Every structure is written in structure tokens, then in C-alpha cells.
Amino acid sequence: MKTRTPISIGIAATLGATFIIFELSDNSGYLSSPFFWGLLMVIIFLFLIMNSIGDLVEDGRFKTLSDEEKEEYLKEKAIPYFQKLWNSAFKKQSASEEKTLLIDHGFDGITELDNALPKWWIGLFYGTIIYCVVYLFAFTLTDYAHPDVEYEVEAKTQLASIKEYEKTAPAIDIETATYSADNIAEGEQIFNTNCMSCHSESGKGGIGPNLTDKNWINIKQKSLFKNVFWMLENGSPNNPTMRPFIKDGVITSRDAEKVAAYIYHINREKVPITEAQGGAAPQGEEAHWEE
Ligand code: HEC
């Protein structure tokens, strides 16, 4: 009669596997889910039931053993589990045992033995088959492990967190707005969507004035960058066509900071687009910006 694997090993291995499965299934927050802890309790409970049934069966069988067998069984049972595992790895068959395992072909004294596969190996083998079936069903019937679904979920959380950031991040005002060359490219995109209809491409002017030349109608700030920001915040005092984009909620103050960087760039760092090149005629007076 064989000794049984201790219940503690069974529980530890199953709980370990459960943890790994939950960890892998991207179920962050499972540690605070009552379902998870309930499942662990059920597993432990089932093990306790199985163990008591095992005890009963073992008792019954033990009684049927001869005295000699009983003694051998008790001796075997006294060896700690891991010690037994270790020993079994280096176990050698006796010559008589080998004879029963011999596959009937040999050559030159080399023979083949039909050893039973180790339990852990068989366990892994059946485990992979079960996993395969579960995975196949989960994959075909649910959203589990589909890259495009995972992508959509990730994108949604990303967008939500950006929105959250926009809500809580301090708004930029005329005092804190600063020029950065890094904002030019993004500013150009914002210009093309929100401003180009009136100021034309590259800001050369149309319904709205030429933004690339030295002449300005509205000079409200000492620096060009801040002047653009001021215009976006307040709109034009003379002409409602140039609306207060920030106050109207058309663009955020952070976008205004970027688009102002773009206008600074086309006005101060590039040559003006003149009338001869298709730009609008200068309007207002020549501005002398501090920066
Ligand atoms: C619906 C047309 C329209 C749109 C869209 C528009 N503007 Fe204007 N913008 C104008 C007009 C018209 C003026 C001239 C206002 C005035 O006469 O005071 C102007 C003036 C300005 C000025 C001041 C120029 C000066 O000489 O005083 C700046 C800077 C400016 N706009 C930037 C922008 C930016 C940046 C955007 C996009 C976010 C934008 N505008 C979108 C029509 C528009």
C-alpha cells in the first residue's frame, strides 16, 4: 500500500496555481475581490473533505494488511515527504524488479525498461491538456486574449486618464504661459484645425490678418508670444470675428500655449509672407516686441 501525499502539499500547490492563473489573467484587483477569497476557501474546504475520505479509505485498507506490511507501511509513512521525493529521484530497481519491467527486445546486453512515468510528469501532461481546452473555449467564446479587444480596453483607459488629467491639471494663464520650441509642431496642427479657415495656411492672412508680418492691429502685451495668448483668451476688442477661443471653450489654455508658440515661430523665426507672395496686406501699426 502506498503512502499519500500530505494535504498541506496539495493545498499549497493548488492555491499557488490559483494565484498564478489570476495573476496571468490580467485581473488586477483580484486580491480585493470576495470571489477570489471565496474560491480559496472552497479549495481548502474540498481538500479537507478529500483528506478525511482518504483517511477513512487508508484506515480500512490498513486493517487488511499483514503485520509485516503494516510495519513497512508505517516505516514508509514516517519519512518526511520531501525526503521521499528526493530518494525516489535516485531510486534503483532491484534485478528482480527490472525483470518485470523489461521490454522484450535487447541488443548487445542493452535492454529497455518500461518504467512508469513520474506522477509529476503525468500531472503536467494532463494539466496542459485541460489548460488547452479551457483556453480554446475562452478564446472562441469570450473576449479573453484577443489583442484587438485588449487594445481597445487599453486605449479607453488611456483616453479616460488623459481626460482626468485635463480636468485636474492647473489651467495655464497669461502669467504662466511660456514659449517652448517643442510645442511648435503640435501648435501647427491646432492652427490648421482652428485658425486656418480665417488666417489661411501658414498664417499668411485672409479673413483674419497676416500673422507673419511686423504689423499688428492688437498690441496688448509686450511680448509677441503673450500677445497671441492674450488674443486667444480675450478675442479681439474691435472685431468679434476673432472670438475669445479659450473663454468660449473652443481650445484649452494648454492648446493656446502651443498654437501661440507656432505663431511666434512663423512671425519671429521665419521671413514674412508678403503681398507679392500671396500674403494679406499689412494691417495696423508696426509692432516692436520685447521678445
Ligand atoms: C472666424 C475667423 C477667425 C478665426 C477662426 C481665427 N481668427 Fe484670429 N483673427 C480674425 C480676425 C478678423 C482678426 C482681426 C481682429 C481685429 O481686427 O482686431 C483676428 C486677429 C487675430 C490675431 C491678432 C492679429 C492682429 O494683428 O492684431 C491673432 C494673434 C489671431 N487672430 C490668432 C488666431 C488664432 C491662433 C486662431 C486659432 C485658434 C484664430 N486667430 C482664429 C479672425 C479669425
Image (tube, helix red, strand yellow):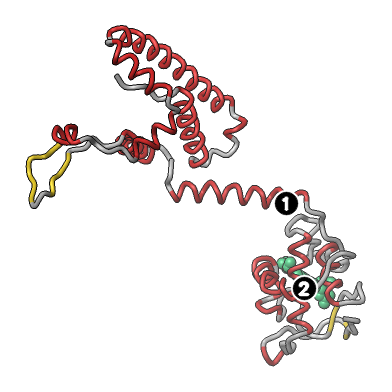
**Mark 1 nearby-residue class (10 Å; few <14, some 14–19, many ≥20):** few
Location of residue 99 with respect to 55 vertically, above or below: below
Answer with the quarter of the image where residue 227 lies. bottom right
Residue under circle 1? 165
Location of residue 227 with respect to 284 vertically, above or below: above
Give coordinates of residue 58: x percent, y percent. 35, 13
The reply, left or right, for residue 284 in relation to residue 23 is right
Q: Tag 2: residue type?
A: Ser
Give coordinates of residue 125: x percent, y percent. 30, 38
Which residue: 75% across, 49% down? 167
Instruction: Using the numbered discs, state the Cα–Cα distance from disc 1 to disc 2 in whole angstroms.
Output: 21 Å
The reply, left or right, for residue 27 in relation to residue 146 is right
State which tag comes first along the sequence, 1 or 2. 1
Describe the element under mark 2 as helix, strand or loop.
loop
Which residue: 78% across, 49% down? 168
The label on residue 180 is: 2
Q: The N terminus appears in which quarter of the rendering?
A: top left
Answer with the quarter of the image where residue 242 lies. bottom right
Answer with the quarter of the image where residue 178 lies. bottom right
Q: The C terminus appears in which quarter of the rendering?
A: bottom right
Residue in front for this viewpoint, 225 or 137:
137
Residue in front for this viewpoint, 81 or 38:
81
Q: Tag 1: residue type?
A: Tyr
Disc 2 residue lies near ligand 1 with CB under 8 A: no
Ligand 1 quarter of the rendering: bottom right
